[in-house]
Image: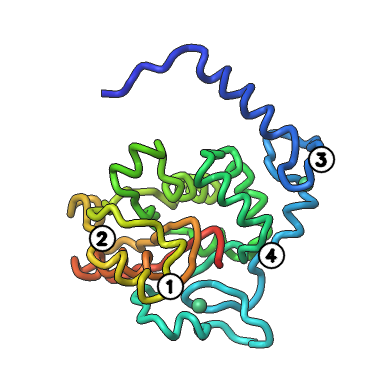
Amino acid sequence: MTKKKKWWVPYFNRVIDFVFTSFCPICEGKVFKDGYSYVCEECLDTLNWVRGTRCKLCGIPMAGIDFNGITCANCRKENLLFEEGRCMFVLEEKARGLIHDIKYHGARMILRDMPGWMERSHGFIEYLEGKVLVPVPLHRRKLGKRGYNQSEWIAHAFCKAVGSNVKVINALKRKKNTPTQTELDRSQRKANVKNAFALRRKDHLSKEDNIMLIDDVFTTGATLNACTQVLKDDGFQKISIATLGHG
Ligand SMILES: [Zn+2]
Ligand SMILES: [Zn+2]
């Protein structure tokens, strides 16, 4: 049963949004733009957007290589099971701050800037077209505590920015309430997420779907790989991944 919303909640949210979107959190300058924008255009331009050639599996830019389809040294160390991957930007201090705001402070309004982000990350819209976006799930206990799943927000922001031929399906669940990966090294990350995920229901996805797993950040790919394993074990073949940041 859904809780009935109080009438003043949308108005209250607008005031909160106005306060948050009136100043760019990076330069703290005032933003005068049509509609909502969280980060100003000038600051957005300073983020390290992925534009050219990149690793086929994680999307990190690879300078000096004039063809796509090869993988970076990091991805070669992992036995990554998904076919393709992309990220929008490389995580430097400013981008890290934005993701932190979304993930830990519930600043969903940041994701309203998604159309502007898509313009800066060349080819990202085309990459998402026709895909079924499956967010990396949180364990229900963590979800209860945080109140939202940032990967789900990101998937919906992608979906909205691309349009009608993309959908979001929460097809996975997290069985194990694993500790955060932040402090762990490569092999610990892998062990931490082993057998952590499962399909929620078999009929959520069809075998023909072009599944794209969505997460906030790509680090070693361990989490996304563990999710891919679950899908592959159940006979799903076409699996790719997309994240906001890499690092
Ligand atoms: Zn700014
Ligand atoms: Zn890579």
**Residue at image point 80% right, 35% down:** 32
- Front position among marks 2 and 4: 2
Give the residue at mark 2: 196
- Of marks 3 and 4, which one's residue comes earlier in the chain? 3
| Amino acid type of the residue that numbered disc 3 sits on in the rendered structure | Gly
Looking at the rendered image, the quarter that the N terminus falls into is: top left
**Residue at image point 42% right, 84% down:** 77
Q: CA distance from mark 2 to mark 4?
A: 32 Å
Give the residue at mark 4: 48
Which labelled disc corresponds to residue 222? none
Q: Viewed as shown, does residue 198 lie left or right of 162?
A: left
- Badge 1 marks a residue whose secondary structure is loop
Location of residue 207 in the rendering, given as x and y in whole percent from the top left corner: 24, 63
Q: CA distance from mark 3 to mark 4?
A: 20 Å
Give the residue at mark 1: 185
Give the residue at mark 3: 29
- Front position among marks 4 and 1: 1
Query: Crowdedness of circle 4 by 10 Å Cα count: few (<14), some, many (20+)?
Result: some
Q: Quadrant of residue 79?
A: bottom left
Ligand 2 within 8 Å of the CB at mark 2: no
Out of 125 and 174, give the one closest to the viewer: 174
| Amino acid type of the residue that numbered disc 2 sits on in the rendered structure | Ala
**Residue at image point 73% right, 47% down:** 26
Looking at the rendered image, the quarter that the C terminus falls into is: bottom right
